[in-house]
């Protein structure tokens, strides 16, 4: 068995972490400085659903913006080399 010496504040953080996990709370990591918070499982699921909805909207917007380029690319694929060369020079 090895002995480990840690700061009292770090020990308290670890003890609080253990208590919150035992109470059934889940861990939430917040960015910019990395912070650890605790929330109930239901609240965590609600937040994930909100984030997924926002990301789906962003994906839909990006796909809508890409459609005009896809039509141009498909028309370019149908052109012969000479048609493409003439189109490019015009």
Image (cartoon, rainbow, N blue to C red):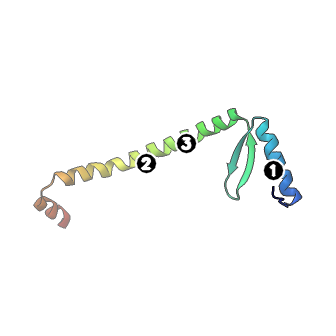
For the point 86% across and 60% down, the residue is 7
Residue located at (59% from left, 36% from top):
49
For disc 2, the neighbor class at 10 Å (few under 14, some 14 to 19, many from 20) is: few
Secondary element under disc 2, as helix, strand or loop, is helix
Are dots 3 and 2 in contact, CB under 8 Å? no
Which residue of the protein is positioned furthest toward the bottom in this rendering?
A: 89
Q: Mark 2 sits on what residue?
A: 62
Using the image, tell me which numbered label, if any, was put on residue 36. none
Q: Position of residue 74 (x, y in %)?
A: 23, 50
Which residue in the structure is indicated by mark 3?
54
Q: Outermost residue, front direction?
A: 1
User: What residue sits 16% from the left and 60% below the top?
Assistant: 84
Query: Dot 1: within a 10 Å radius of its alpha carbon, few (fewer than 14), some, or many (20 or more) residues?
Result: few
Q: Nearer the viewer, residue 39 or 14?
A: 14
Q: Which mark is residue 14?
A: 1
Q: Secondary structure at mark 3?
A: helix
Sequence-wise, the earlier of marks 1 and 3 is 1
90 displayed left or right of 9: left
State the residue at coordinates (16%, 51%): 78
Residue 58, position in %: x, y?
49, 46
């Amino acid at each position: 068995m090895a002995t480990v010496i840690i700061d009292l504040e770090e020990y308290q953080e670890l003890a609080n972490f253990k208590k919150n996990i035992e109470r059934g709370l889940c861990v939430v990591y917040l960015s910019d400085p990395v912070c650890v918070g605790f929330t109930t499982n239901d609240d965590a699921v609600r937040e994930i659903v909100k984030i997924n909805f926002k990301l789906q909207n962003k994906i839909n917007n990006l796909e809508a913006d890409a459609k005009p380029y896809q039509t141009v690319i498909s028309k370019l694929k149908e052109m012969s080399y000479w048609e493409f060369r003439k189109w490019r020079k015009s």
